[in-house]
Image (cartoon, coloured by chain):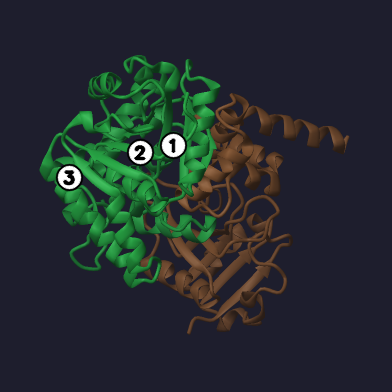
Chain colours: A brown, B green
Amino acid sequence: MMRHIIFDTGRSRSLPRDHALRKSAAKNIKSADVVIAIGSRVGKHASSLPRWKDKTAVLLELGTECLGIYTGESRGEEGSNVLGFARFRLGNSEPSDLIELVRQPRTRVAAIAAAKQVFEEAGLQVAVCGDFAGRIIDRLVRPYYNSALRRLDEGLASADDLDTTLRLGLGYPEGPIALLDRTGLAHHYDVTQALFEAYGDAAYAPARRARVAKQRSAAKKK
Amino acid sequence: MASAISTVGIAGSGTMGAGIAIVAARAGFKTIVYDTHQDALDRARKQTEGFLAKSVARKKLSRQQADRILGDLCGTTRIGDLAGCDIVIEAVFESLKVKHELLGGLNQVCPPHTLFASNTSTLSITEIAAGSGRDDRCVGMHFCLPAQLMKLVEMSPGIRTSDESFQKAWDFCKALGQTPVRTKDNPGFILNYFLVPFNNDAIRLVESGVAAPADIDRAVKAGLGYPMGPLELLDLIGLDTQLLLCNALYGVTHDPRAACPPLVKRMIAAGHLGRKSGRGFFDYSGNAMFGA
């Protein structure tokens, strides 16, 4: 069994305070095979990465940034025992069971296996992906959500009919309009705007309704 | 226009036509399936009998109900036999020319009150209706595959469809026990408009090395709660069908997301069409996964 230790920099979106992985964490780094750094300021552990090079895996919780920011990149041959990860959640909704595990081209196979083992033993599901902005889910759903919002504006169908069609036709648990209402259009704006800046692809350009929601949210904070 | 619908015509006895015919007969309508090929009608009849037998075995239907449904279903190769229909739903090949020829012929044999409905998933209802000789009585009724199991029907009026015709078709759809949703006459309506580019985006993630097919599908199912991953779904749909859908949608919208990813064409060339060929994004000859 892999032993892991957690370094918490505060405000983790992946592992809430009562999560099983926190409860089962080792207290002493010497006894840990896997180091997990969580929270919104994992960057402060970047200088510790060389000290942890003998650990089986070092896992850094990511926001929207790439892992390469912390590890550095070199000629497409970067990779070590360090991986990134993020538990997928939409806005402030409950986190899903999905861990997107970010690898680099030369990431050690043993590090990937250890990371998967630690997360899966905690009841999470792991999808391995490359170190690209948006990883898997955001790359896929943000153009779809933007498209749904645009088509709603264009009167393709009512919000209810759009949602009903995608639920009944494809078995989705929730239609895109209801989902964005629930999880926050302003949050969708933040994510899709970041992807638009990263890729320059018009499909990621925030839809009008997301832009309006973001502007209203900003106006309320003033 | 006579208001009651009692006899339904289905033109085309492929997978969709046969499924829609089951829906109509199951709802108590006398249903006539028309196809130019007797062997296609025979095949559809056999599939229908098989489906109903399974429904009886699973206690979804009684034997008497299944017999009644089969009794209300008949096939014909003569277009004139649809003369007594109150509505004809066409489910023939997705070609404007083919549909115009069919509807033009139906217009000659059907009485003025007969509604024409199209099960097209990608063509314009207005353009289909324009060749029907009765464009005010044409509506879009797009059933989902498999029609006999899926409740959703996307319904769209063409530009010249009368309100009365659309309402009559809408009421008929409800009488079938289906769930209609109203959509504008736009390419792909709702379902394919969103699904085809979404699936292409998933293929592009594979193409660009973001993740392996199994990881993409696992992420979508675990992260979004979808019942099936996009690549698994594409293998079910068939890569050759995805190419046709892309060409139809991109041809009208010129949306870059609807353009067929090059990997699809390479996979088709390699014979990796999906489940039907035993290999697509995944390998169906065993449990091994193919990383495309």
Disc 2 target residue? B8
Q: Are marks 1 and 2 in contact (CB under 8 Å)?
A: yes
Q: Chain of mark 1?
A: B
Q: CA distance from mark 3 to mark 1?
A: 24 Å
Disc 3 target residue? B41
Q: Are marks 1 and 2 on the same chain?
A: yes
Element marked by disc 3: helix
Q: Chain of mark 3?
A: B
Counting labels gives 3
Check disc 1 and give the amino acid type. Answer: Ile
Check disc 2 and give the amino acid type. Answer: Val
**Which is closer to the viewer, label 2 or label 3?**
2
Labels 2 and 3: the sequence-earlier one: 2
Residue B252 horizontal/vertical position (percent): 37, 21
Disc 1 target residue? B5
Residue B116 horizontal/vertical position (percent): 37, 27
Compared with B148, B12 (above or below) is above
Q: Residues within 10 Å of mark 1 (few under 14, many from 20)?
A: some
